[in-house]
C-alpha cells in the first residue's frame, strides 16, 4: 500500500466516524431542545395559570362585571400574543374566554374542555387544520368556596418552527463541517506522512500568476530543509524576473499601438476599395474585429501600466461630480434599456471635487457597464452619490448574478474573470475593473466590493470630500 492510498483510507475512516458523531450529536441536540422547549412552554403556562388563579380569582368577589376580562387582557394580551386563556367556574360556566388570535391559528370557542385527570395537567390538542395547541389546565378554590378551572395555551407551531430551524441548520452545516474536516484531516495526514509529497504538490501549483507564494520550509535541519529553502530563493528570483516583464508590458503596449492602427486601416481599406467575395469579406471582417479587440486590450494595458507607474498626468480641476454622475448614468441608460434593465439614480446635488473629469467618467461608465453585463433582463441597477462621514461615496449596485466569495479578493486583478466563458462572450478581457482600481488609486480614493451569488453586487468608491441637496431618478 503506497502513501497516497493509505492517506485516502485513513481519511475515509476519519470522515465516517466524524459523520456518525455529528449525527448522534444532532439527534441528541434535537431531542434535548424539543424537551427543553416543551418544559419551558409548560412552565410558562403553569405560571400564567397560577398567577390568574391565585392573584386575580382571589380578588374576583366584590369586583365589578368585566373586571377579570380587563385584568387578563391588560396582563397577557392574548389576541396579540396568540395565546389561549379560559376561566371556568363550576356551577356558573365560562367567566372569561380570550378572543381569537390575530393570525387565526385557532378558534378559542372550539377548544374542548379537559376531562377527568386532564383537569390538572398538560394537553396537546390537534386542531382541524393540522395545527396543534399546547394547553395547561389547573383547578383552584377561592376563599369564598368557588371552584375554578383555569386554562392557558399557546400554539405548538412556535416550538415546531424552532425545531425546523435546527433541522435546517444541521442539514446545511453538517455536509460543510464534514467536508472541511475531511480536507483538514487529509492535509494533516499528508503533512505527517509525506512532507516531500507536500513540497512536490505545492511546487506544481505555483505558476507565473502566484509567484508570491512559497513552498513550506520543513524544519528538519537536514538536506530536506536546505532543499525547500533553495527552492524558495529560486522562486523569489523568478518573481523578480516576472516583475521586470510586467514593467516591460507598458513599453510593449505603447509600441504595439501603431502597427495595430496601421493594420486596422489596411484591412478597412481592402474592404472598402476592392471587390471581395462574401467569404473573404467575412474573414477580413472577423480579422478586423479581432484587431479592434486587440487595440482595446493594448490601450487598457497601457492605461493601467501608466496609472500604476504614476506617468499619467491627471487634470485635477474642480468639477460638479453630481452633474457628471447624473449625465453619465443617463447616457448609460440606453444600454440598460436594451436589456429592459431599470437604471435608478439617487444623487445628492452640489457635490464637487478636484479630479480628472475624463478618468472619473470612465470609472462610472465601467462600473455601470459591468453591472449591465451581469444583470439579467428585467433587473435593476442603482447608482448613488452621497456624503458620509466626511467622504464622497459613489455606489453602483445591482441584483444580478453576483460574484462567488472566492473570487471577491481577485476582481480588481488584471485579466481576472470569475466567469471566463461569459466574460469572453460579452467581449470582456478582465481589465475594466483593473482600470477602475488604478484610476481610483490615482485620485486617492478607495474602492470596495461586496457581493453574494444570486443576489447581486455592490461597488463602493470613497473619495476625500466637499458639499449637497438631493435628487433621485429611476428609468427603465
Image (spheres, helix red, strand yellow):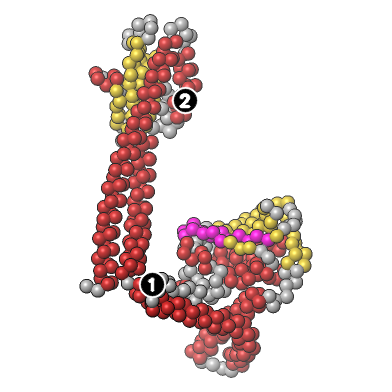
- Determine which residue is flagged by label 2: 77
Task: Find residue 207 and report its horizontal and vertical position in percent.
Answer: 46, 78
Task: Find residue 323 and report its horizontal and vertical position in percent.
Answer: 72, 61
Relative placement, left or right, of 39 versus 348 is: left
Residue 96 visible? The answer is no
- Determine which residue is flagged by label 1: 220
Task: Find residue 466 and report its horizontal and vertical position in percent.
Answer: 74, 57
Task: Find residue 168 and report its horizontal and vertical position in percent.
Answer: 36, 48
Name the quarter where the N terminus is drawn.
Answer: bottom left
Which type of secondary structure does the marked residue at label 1 adopt?
Answer: loop
Q: Nearer the viewer, mark 2 or mark 1?
A: 1
Please name the residue shown 67% across and 54% down the image. 386
250 lies above or below 456: below
Alpha carbons under labels 2 and 1: distance apart: 72 Å
319 lies above or below 31: below
Q: Main secondary structure of the magenta part?
A: strand
Q: Which residues are magenta?
A: 449-463
316 lies above or below 167: below
Query: In the rendered image, which quarter is residue 45 located in?
Result: top left
Report crowding for label 2: few under 14, some 14 to 19, many 20 or more residues within 10 A (C-alpha): some
7 lies above or below 172: below
Report crowding for label 1: few under 14, some 14 to 19, many 20 or more residues within 10 A (C-alpha): few
Relative placement, left or right, of 6 versus 393 is: left
Relative placement, left or right, of 271 versus 73 is: right
Relative placement, left or right, of 455 versus 386 is: left
Amino acid at each position: 500500500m503506497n502513501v497516497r492510498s493509505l492517506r485516502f483510507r485513513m481519511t475515509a475512516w476519519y470522515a465516517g466516524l466524524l459523520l456518525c458523531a455529528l449525527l448522534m450529536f444532532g439527534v441528541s441536540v434535537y431531542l434535548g431542545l424539543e424537551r427543553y422547549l416543551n418544559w419551558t412552554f409548560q412552565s410558562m403556562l403553569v405560571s400564567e395559570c397560577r398567577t390568574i388563579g391565585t392573584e386575580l380569582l382571589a380578588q374576583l368577589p366584590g369586583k365589578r362585571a368585566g373586571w377579570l376580562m380587563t385584568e387578563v387582557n391588560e396582563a397577557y394580551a392574548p389576541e396579540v400574543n396568540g395565546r389561549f386563556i379560559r376561566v371556568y367556574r363550576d356551577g356558573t360556566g365560562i367567566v372569561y374566554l380570550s378572543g381569537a388570535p390575530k393570525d387565526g391559528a385557532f378558534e378559542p370557542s372550539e377548544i374542548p374542555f379537559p376531562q377527568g385527570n386532564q383537569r390538572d395537567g398538560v394537553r396537546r390538542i390537534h386542531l382541524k387544520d393540522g395545527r396543534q395547541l399546547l394547553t395547561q389546565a389547573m383547578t383552584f378554590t377561592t376563599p369564598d368556596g368557588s371552584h375554578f378551572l383555569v386554562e392557558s395555551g399557546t400554539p405548538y407551531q412556535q416550538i415546531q418552527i424552532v425545531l425546523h430551524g435546527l433541522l435546517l441548520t444541521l442539514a446545511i452545516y453538517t455536509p460543510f463541517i464534514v467536508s472541511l474536516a475531511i480536507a483538514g484531516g487529509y492535509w494533516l495526514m499528508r503533512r505527517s506522512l509525506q512532507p516531500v509529497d507536500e513540497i512536490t504538490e505545492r511546487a506544481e501549483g505555483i505558476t507565473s500568476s502566484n509567484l508570491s507564494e512559497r513552498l513550506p520550509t520543513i524544519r528538519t535541519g537536514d538536506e530536506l530543509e536546505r532543499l525547500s529553502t533553495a527552492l524558495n530563493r529560486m522562486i523569489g528570483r523568478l518573481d523578480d524576473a516576472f516583475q521586470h516583464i510586467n514593467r516591460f508590458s507598458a513599453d510593449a503596449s505603447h509600441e504595439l499601438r501603431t502597427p495595430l492602427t496601421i493594420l486596422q486601416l489596411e484591412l478597412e481599406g481592402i474592404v472598402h476599395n476592392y471587390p471581395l467575395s462574401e467569404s473573404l469579406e467575412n474573414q477580413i471582417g472577423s480579422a478586423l474585429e479581432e484587431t479592434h479587440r486587440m487595440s482595446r486590450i493594448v490601450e487598457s494595458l497601457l492605461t493601467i501600466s501608466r496609472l500604476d507607474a504614476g506617468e499619467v498626468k491627471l487634470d485635477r480641476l474642480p468639477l460638479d461630480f453630481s452633474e457628471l454622475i447624473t449625465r453619465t448614468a443617463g447616457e448609460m441608460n440606453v444600454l440598460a434599456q436594451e436589456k429592459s434593465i431599470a437604471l435608478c439614480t439617487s444623487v445628492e446635488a452640489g457635490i464637487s471635487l478636484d479630479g480628472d473629469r475624463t478618468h472619473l467618467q470612465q470609472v462610472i461608465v465601467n462600473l455601470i457597464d459591468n453591472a449591465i453585463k451581469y444583470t439579467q433582463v428585467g433587473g435593476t441597477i442603482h447608482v448613488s452619490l452621497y456624503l458620509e462621514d466626511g467622504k464622497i461615496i459613489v455606489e453602483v449596485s445591482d441584483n444580478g448574478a453576483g460574484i462567488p466569495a472566492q473570487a471577491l479578493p481577485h476582481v480588481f486583478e488584471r485579466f481576472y474573470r470569475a466567469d471566463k466563458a461569459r466574460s469572453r462572450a460579452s467581449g470582456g478581457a478582465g481589465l475594466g475593473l483593473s482600470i477602475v482600481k488604478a484610476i481610483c488609486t490615482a485620485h486617492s480614493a478607495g474602492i470596495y466590493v461586496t457581493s453574494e451569488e444570486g443576489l447581486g453586487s455592490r461597488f463602493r468608491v470613497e473619495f476625500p470630500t466637499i458639499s449637497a441637496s438631493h435628487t433621485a431618478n429611476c428609468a427603465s
